Amino acid sequence: MPDIVSPQVRSRMMAGIRGKDTKPEMIVRKGLHAAGFRYRLHVKDIPGKPDLVFPGRRAVVFVNGCFWHGHDCRFFRMPSTRQEFWSEKIEANKVRDREVSDRLAREGWRQLVIWECALRGVPESQTAGVIAEAAAWLHDPDGLHEIRGTV
């Protein structure tokens, strides 16, 4: 199916997609802050510039968009146009995610990945459950964890 907008309009639309302060990230930030956690944002000195950094707990949190990180959930669908471009782009993102995760582990950082599908279009009670799970993980010495949405 051809694109329904011009290349210039599509370019402007894609340029408007945020990399920071996304709606799912703001839900997590507000929820963890309300639960009493304090953190730093997008620390450049830490591999991958995690969304939230808890230096005292040696923990980082990434709030990943399902499309951009190629998550196997209901929100990821490969675009029908420019498939080769998108396939290469998303695969490169996945490779970079693995490299960042490996580097963080080597440097002693605990990692939590919260996927967009765990927060998008869900009732507030389920969002509260995600925040509670993240808070429990922050208290636990476990290394790598992820919170996914239901299929």
Image (cartoon, rainbow, N blue to C red):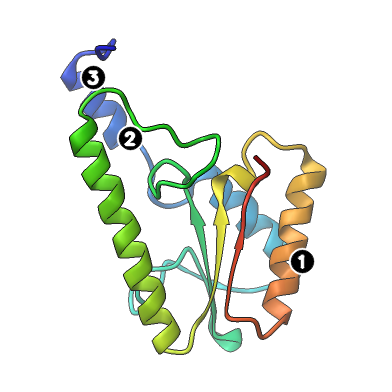
Tell me if mark 1 has few (under 14), some (14-19) or many (20+) residues whose alpha carbon lies within 10 angstroms of its own: few
User: Given the image, on which type of amino acid does mark 3 rest?
Assistant: Val
Disc with the residue nearer the chain's start (3 vs 1): 3
Counting from the top left corner in percent of width and height, residue 56 is at 59, 88
Look at 33% across and 35% down and name the residue there.
16
**Residue bearing the label numbered 3:** 9
| Separation (CA) of disc 3 from disc 1 | 41 Å
Query: What separation in Å lies between label 3 and label 2 (alpha carbons)?
Result: 11 Å
Is 106 drawn above or below residue 66 in the view shown? below
Which image quadrant is residue 57 in? bottom right
The correct choice, above or below, for 32 with respect to 39 in the image is: above
Is label 1 in a helix, a strand or a loop? loop
Q: Which residue is mark 1?
A: 35
Q: Quadrant of residue 143?
A: bottom right
User: Which badge, 3 or 2, is on the more N-terminal residue?
Assistant: 3
Q: 105 or 38, which lies in front?
A: 105
Instruction: Please report whichever mark, 2 or 1, sits nearer to the chain's N-terminal start.
Output: 2
Q: In the figure, is residue 79 to the left or right of 63?
A: left
Query: Callout 1, which amino acid?
Result: Ala
> What residue is at 55 percent from the left and 35 percent from the top?
74
Task: For mark 3, give the secondary structure.
Answer: helix
Mark 2: amino acid: Gly
- Residue 130 sits in which quadrant? bottom right
Marks 3/1 in contact by CB < 8 Å: the verdict is: no
Residue annotated with mark 2: 16
| Neighbourhood count class around disc 2 (C-alpha, 10 Å): few under 14, some 14–19, many 20 upward | few
Residue that appears at 36% across and 63% down? 97
